[in-house]
Image (tube, rainbow, N blue to C red):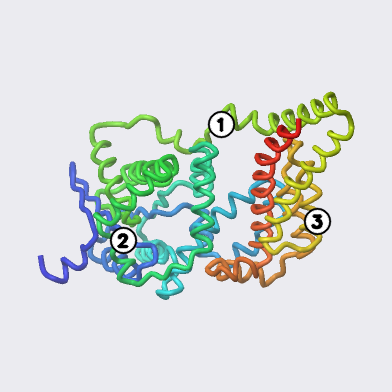
Amino acid sequence: MTEQTASLYEGTTIIESEGRRIVLLGTAHVSQSSVRQVRMLADAERPDCMCIEIDESRYRSLTDSEAWKKLDIYSVIRQGKGFLLLGNLALASFQRRIGKELGVKPGAEMVEAVGVAREKTIPVVLCDREIQITLKRAWASGGLWSKSKMMAALLGSLFGGESVSEADIESLKETDALSAMMEELSDYLPGAKRVLIDERDRYLAEKIHEAAGSNILAVVGAGHVPGIVRTLEALQAGPIDPPLEELNLIPPKGLISRLLPWLVPLAVGTLFAAGFVRSGWDLTRDMFLLWVLVNGGLSAIGAAIALAHPLTIVASFLAAPITSMNPTIGVGFVSGLLEAVFRKPRVHDFENLQTDIASFRGFFRNRITRVLLVFAFSTVGSSIGTFIGIPYLTSLL
């Protein structure tokens, strides 16, 4: 193998079995060399099919500059998808910051792969699972503590100021570095690691296995290559359980998650009733004022941290003690919608959304992301207030 050929196939894994050749190219999603390598490998391999680690919705967002302008922030809040969209943007934010430093658009090698395939009329399989399903399954993968750690990790990536060099990015393709990262994620968030990495390894591998043709070029993130290889080897022996369709299902909420919205108002109402029976209206009034101050106060502080409109902050204070007693609506619904009304997103907020999420200031400057931060921070503040307020109410009895 010549030096040029060795360089061309650097970071690839080749699987040959039963007259079929699969070339797995492990990329870093903000690597300029990965972009170049995609085209060169397509020229060298002349594949029958190209499998690409991307789903339809992410591909549209990468290739359609007008996609974010169609976002209806009011519907997002009304449908309770604020955390889901914020998580999606948080995941994109870190890659965009790195890509900005290196002059590479995140996912550019995936877009390049689709472009090359179209130029050469090569069939394409977008073989990743829909991002919304992945995020929902990741959120449902753990209990309250895991969800708290996941939110902390997302916010940390959102507001972190790490600077990463191109050499650091290229090192992400190294197996040892990736293994260490996977082990760290497994220890910190085992449920999320299973959904974000292991399940997608399986999903990607099956889609590659099902692709038509005897010579396949698969462009995937380097972190998925070991899992894909293991799954492809296992598939040679036959189907794997559970069926792939089950990885597209959103697990139902657990019993505690279903009951908690009803248990909180029941507990608070019971404490108010006990206070009235024990000491009459005076104690009940004191308990009510404490509940309002703690729950409403922390929700208002959360809204203020998100730089909400002054009237949104007041509304968060007034609404949180009430919405905490209502299982069907949260304070984020109120604060998010009001923030969107008081500071209606402008045309350039939609136009600059993809740029603004790459910086701390941009997240607060853009009215779309600020609505989401108000939604999230006021909700978190109210939740903290609920779990602090109930023991305080108990102590007054």
**Along the polypeptide, which appears first: circle 3 or circle 1?**
1
Nearest the viewer among 194 and 238 is: 194
Mark 3 = which residue?
314
Q: Which amino acid lies under the numbered mark 3 shown in the image of this protein?
A: Val
Q: Residue furthest left?
A: 1
Q: Which amino acid lies under the numbered mark 1 shown in the image of this protein?
A: Pro
* Numbered circles on residues, count: 3
Disc 2 secondary structure class: loop
Task: Please tell me the numbered disc located at residue 184.
Answer: none
Disc 3 secondary structure class: helix
- Residue at x 80%, y 31% (from the top left corner): 272
Report the quarter where the N terminus lies. bottom left
**Along the polypeptide, which appears first: circle 2 or circle 3?**
2
Give me the C-alpha separation between circle 1 and circle 2.
35 Å
Query: Horizontal and vertical percent for residue 310?
Result: 79, 63
Give me the C-alpha separation between circle 3 and circle 1.
35 Å
Mark 2 = which residue?
172
Crowd around label 2: few <14 · some 14–19 · many ≥20 (10 Å): many
